[in-house]
Amino acid sequence: MKAVQVVGYDQPLRMTEVAAPTVTGPYDVVVRIGGAGVCRTDIHILEGQWKEKSGVTLPYTIGHENAGWVHAVGSAVTNVAEGDKVIVHPLITCGLCRACRFGDDVHCEQSQFPGIDTAGGYAEYLKTSARSVVKIDGSLEPADVAALADAGLTAYHAAAKAARRLRPGDKCVVIGAGGLGHIGIQVLKAISAAELIVVDRNPDAVKLAVSIGADHGVVGDGSQVTQVLDLTGGHGAEAVIDFVGEGGATRDGIAMLRRAGDYHVVGYGENIDVPTIDIISTEITLVGNLVGSYNDLCELMVLAAQGRVKLHTARYSLDRFQDALDDLGAGHIRGRAILVP
């Protein structure tokens, strides 16, 4: 089968022919890929940022946002059958460790992460497990929802976590209305009554945010902190969800926060520099967010089937993988880029 692989760090990806995955265990599921999301993490992988953390052996197939049709199943698989349309949770988990038993499978002690530390979905087929596939509604198509497997799941996880503490009338700031942010905005509008303020440097992204439910759009022109404080009566927001995490976003995010507020870190790339005395005196909380659980993905698929969460996508054929990555890196993608074999 055709697969796009990492052959070296700081080197271009390469399309090659590799053996298609086959069922070897009772709980294996092989998925024929209908769409694979192109994520900024893929760029970070090529830059070598995940080299030590993943420990993956090169070459390997990249791609961690995947959806398609079940192609083959192991003898013990009962939750899906050949031909079913599915979205793939980004982790292959054991189901037996303490985290899995608590339903917190994103922290599985024995997990594999296709596209990060094992073969991913920039290919025609992907091997995963019965614990990782979620059947999707008949009204949905794999290429339309593929990026919800990671970008959407991450956004949902952070938004749902923030929503549990947000009350009607509270203010929530979303920094970044791009690939993750535009999903998080829709999730927040679907599950929370908080007033939503979206900040982005790109005026078109701000317009998109308002069109999908943001109550206020703020263009990051250097005055964004002042504008947010004005919109919150000088107090700051009860929650800030930062989908950027670099370029000064963390400094701005902390400055936009109300006393005893929650700062949710989703995007990454720079350090958070906050004097400990400020954390103590204001009792702010810094909250990390890493992907989301299988149950989070099931809930997100309900919102997708209801039409309350929609992806804005740009499709590329699999052999145009470099164009997709270049467009993403240059900031030309509004929403998510999807590779379609």
Image: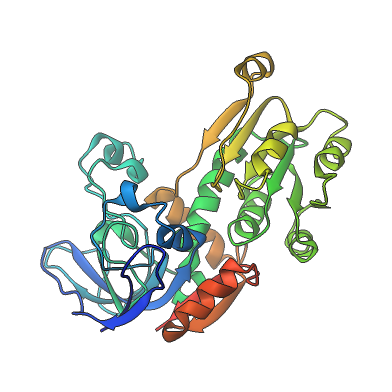
The residue shown at (11%, 63%) is 25
Front residue of 57 and 157: 57
Q: Quadrant of residue 245?
A: top right
Residue at horizontal 75 percent and vertical 35 percent from the top:
256
Image quadrant holding the C terminus, namely: bottom left
Visible residue check, residue 144: no
- Is residue 169 toward the left or the right of residue 88 in the image? right
In the image, residue 120 lies at what x, y percent? 32, 67
Q: Nearer the viewer, residue 132 or 332?
A: 332
* Residue 27 visible (yes or no): yes
Numbered circles on residues, count: 0
Q: Is residue 120 left or right of residue 296?
A: left
State the quadrant of the N terminus. bottom left
State the residue lying farthest toward the front: 10
Residue 15 point in image, percent of width and height: 34, 81
In this view, 281 is above or below 30 = above
25 left or right of 328 in image:
left
| Image quarter of residue 312 | bottom right
Q: Is residue 11 above or below residue 197?
A: below
Please, which colouring scheme is shown? rainbow
Q: Position of residue 230 (x, y in %)?
A: 89, 37
Q: Residue at x 61, y 49 (%)?
A: 243
